[in-house]
Amino acid sequence: MWPLLFISITSLACIFERFAYWNEAFVNNDKKLIFTVEKYSTISSVDYMKLNEISPIPLETVLLDALKIIDQSFLKDKRNIDIKLALEISIQSIQSEFGKFSNIFSTIITISPLLGLLGTVLGLINSFSFIKLGEAGENVQQVTGGISEALISTAAGLIVAIITLVCSNYFNSLWKKQNSILNQYCGKFEILYRTNKLQ
């Protein structure tokens, strides 16, 4: 039960962190996202170099990173890098933040039921040690009480795994939805950026 307690605390801490991140990061307001695209499509290198703070909005972070990549490439080899490539690099770089704790969640989902089962097996072994052959009816309460206590660890392991699995799948759905939004609005940004550059 002690390892399960540690795992459950770790799982809850990661879940709360992900809820806080997605609550702040997820923007599904079309007007706000369009405003962000228009803002960054006309911004100059001097202006965006002043923006050192990390935005909680993933789209803003991606567009800012893409503009920095374009500017650095232009300064190094005197030619403009493809805006589409810069956006792809930026979108790829933010994936690690979207998928934060995914490996921890997968490990907890796998190991929690196994630890619960291990606790049950060890508890049953301990309970059956009270059984004395030839003495029927003796130590019945000790044996049945030990079995019921042993089964608690399996239930605890399953509860931890189920809660973690539900939350992990929810975060993965937000991850996919956010990627869809990024691809959609980065495409709009690319069109506006190329249009503004030609003017």
Image: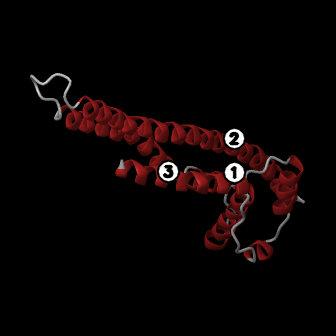
Picture disc at residue 84: 1
Query: To which residue does mark 3 refer?
Result: 11
Which element is circle 2 on?
helix
Query: What residue appears at the point 23 percent right and 35 percent down from the top-left corner?
Result: 127
Q: Is residue 33 left or right of residue 158?
A: right
Closer to viewer: mark 3 or mark 2:
3
Picture disc at residue 26: none
Query: What residue appears at the point 48 percent right and 46 percent down from the top-left corner?
Result: 105
Q: In this view, does 1 lie to the left or right of 53?
A: left
Q: Is residue 160 above or below residue 17?
A: above
Label 3 sits on what residue type?
Ser
Query: What residue appears at the point 16 percent right and 30 percent down from the top-left corner?
Result: 131
Give the percent coordinates (x, y) of residue 94.
Answer: 61, 55
- Mark 3–mark 1 contact, CB under 8 Å? no
Label 1 sits on what residue type?
Lys
Give the CA separation, mark 3 to mark 1: 38 Å
Compare residues 74 and 128 and report the one nearer the observer.
128
Which quadrant would residue 97 be assigned to in this image? Answer: bottom right
Query: To which residue does mark 2 refer?
Result: 177
Q: Is residue 42 left or right of residue 102?
A: right
> Quarter holding the C terminus?
bottom right
Q: Is residue 26 left or right of residue 103?
A: right
Mark 2 or 1, nearer chain start: 1
Mark 3 or 2, nearer chain start: 3
Residue 198 visible here: no
Give the percent coordinates (x, y) of residue 149.
Answer: 35, 38
Closer to viewer: mark 3 or mark 1:
3
Residue 134 visible here: yes
Mark 3 or 1, nearer chain start: 3
